[in-house]
Image (cartoon, coloured by chain):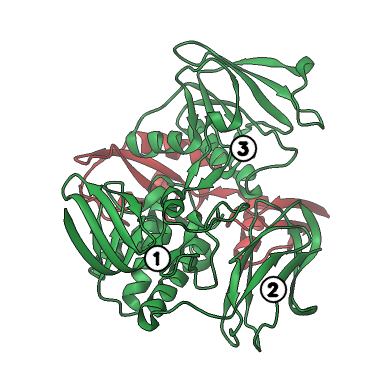
Chain colours: A green, B red
Amino acid sequence: MNTLSYDIAVIGGGPAGLAAAVKARELGMDRILLVERDYELGGILQQCIHDGFGLLRFKKQLSGCQYAQKFIDLVAEGGIDVLCDTMVLELTDDRRIYAVSAQEGLLEIRAQAVILAMGCRERTRPQVSIMGSRPAGVLTAGSVQRYINMEGYLPGKKAVILGSGDIGLIMARRMTLEGIEVEGVYEVMSSLGGLRRNKVQCLDDYGIPLHLSTTVTKIHGNKRVEAVTVALVGSDGKPVRETERVIPCDLLVLSVGLIPENELSRKAGVQLHPVTRGPVVDDTMMTSVPGVFAAGNVVAVFDLVDYVSRSGEIAAQGAADFIRRQSAQENMVDTVAGSNVGFVLPQRVSADCRGKEINLYLRVRKPMKDVRADIMCNGKILKSTHYGVANPPEMIALRLVPDGPLDGPLTVDVR
Amino acid sequence: MTTKQYVCIVCPMSCSIELTDDSGVLTVKGNTCKRGEEYAKNEYTDPKRMITTTVGLRGSRLRCLPVISREAVPKKLLRDCMKQLYATVVDAPVRQGDVIVANILGTGVDIIAARSITL
């Protein structure tokens, strides 16, 4: 087994990992390794051929691949070591990484700091419990995206989409343009799962109907999907049998949510948060394991890649500082999800953060209009921001520069 | 006086925009940035959309090259543009920004490669 030694090892070459590696180089770290299991860098951005990426960072409307390319070029210019086709099998709490690749065989990588950037995974059929047979033709929206946009296959002729998350909406348009008939999008909740802009440009533009409070109750077909049954959902969340109807189709596309991919984190003893399902992190993106940092969708599912890249850069700064002083931050205070707030990231911030910028990310629990997001500490409002609308799918990003040390938990209320 | 409601599609903020046409004078409210104003005015007069799709790719392990229009094209020409792009095949290697189709359908808009392909 080969043993490698690095200052910073980044696991995952998607937007979070790319930004972390580039930033670490900028900060003067010499030995940086980026490990990626696919054959190339870029992560899911490579299959996101649609535009809308990078408006905050580059003030341009880029496609996912264009956004990735900018960072991939910087990784190459920075001479950062990259191992593609390499799968990390295990991370230990003393920052040893075991990985395997076709070219290198089994590897042990020792790093002074590790940045977790594994992203997230789509929820699949077993996680939404649909009855019926198990034929071919039930795919997640991301798989359909990869087939169509990168591999060049059309996975069906007539599709029904379950779930109105962004990838589902994007794929409704994409499949329509590629000649697959999209019968409709079905959403079990009473409100849209994705961003409103995506309903406008992906469904409304193409006359694709959105059916709220409706779900797929059964899949029909033996070898191949032949039809699905859909039904309205009552206020108790259960399908109403009398409203069932059968829709012939050969493809059921699932866009039913994303889950941070934390198998490696869990094994390394990293504390996970029950709501975000990602590591509990502080304002330097350090997890509960000293020297192990996390960035991007592995921490919580972000809806803007700009935020993901930013979190990668914060993690790189945190990792560089950690290596230079070889100790964890002391004097931390918790952040608290207050009224109408589902979660706040990071979960801990340094109490001595006077004049230091803190980025807070949060999601509200329910759609609201004309609200204020208040950051409070010990009964004092440190910052208040007004929003015309606040929707759960649209993450709120707040910046705080405290003018003194924090003498208690930071609570964020939205009302 | 006509009033129209739009949801801006320029970025994920999805701003709710209200456009008012007072005998040819267009006023826009609710947008966060200039792009939103431009979007609402375009949407009212001549709706435009970006083109993002793939063209065929030879000589790579991938079979598709993602492409993007440099600017938005008139919405009514979208399908015809797509049709032309379906018939387009290019050879690897490709560099991000290479012009794949210049001035598509006389719109003055180039279609460019959205990524580099080395293998």
Mark found first going from the N terminus, 1 or 2: 1
Q: Along the line of sight, which residue is nearer the eye, B93 or A313?
A: A313
Name the spot of residue A268 as percent of width and height, x first. 41, 56
Residue denoted by label 1: A19
Q: Quadrant of residue A312?
A: bottom left
Looking at the image, residue B95 sits to the left or right of residue A163; the answer is left
Using a 10 Å C-alpha cutoff, classify the residue at mark 2 as few (fewer than 14 neighbours), some (14 to 19) or many (20 or more): many
Mark found first going from the N terminus, 2 or 3: 3
- Dividing the image into 4 quarters, which one contains the C terminus of chain A? bottom right
3D distance between C-alphas at marks 1 and 2: 28 Å
Q: Amino acid at mark 3?
A: Leu
The answer to whether dots 1 and 2 both sit on one chain is: yes
Using a 10 Å C-alpha cutoff, classify the residue at mark 1 as few (fewer than 14 neighbours), some (14 to 19) or many (20 or more): many
Q: Disc 1 vs disc 3: Cβ atoms closer than 8 Å?
A: no
Name the spot of residue B35 as percent of width and height, x first. 60, 63
Check the image and report above or below for A367 versus A3: above
Residue denoted by label 3: A203
The residue drawn where x is 24% and y is 51% is B94
Q: Judging from the image, what secondary structure is the residue with disc 2 in?
A: strand
Q: Along the line of sight, which residue is nearer the eye, A146 or A275?
A: A275
Residue A90 can be seen, yes or no: yes
**Viewer-side label of 2, 3:** 2
Check the image and report above or below for A220 versus B60: above
Q: Amino acid at mark 1?
A: Ala
Q: Quadrant of residue A332?
A: bottom right
The residue drawn where x is 53% and y is 38% is A123
Res. A410 mark: 2
3D distance between C-alphas at marks 1 and 3: 32 Å
3D distance between C-alphas at marks 2 and 3: 40 Å
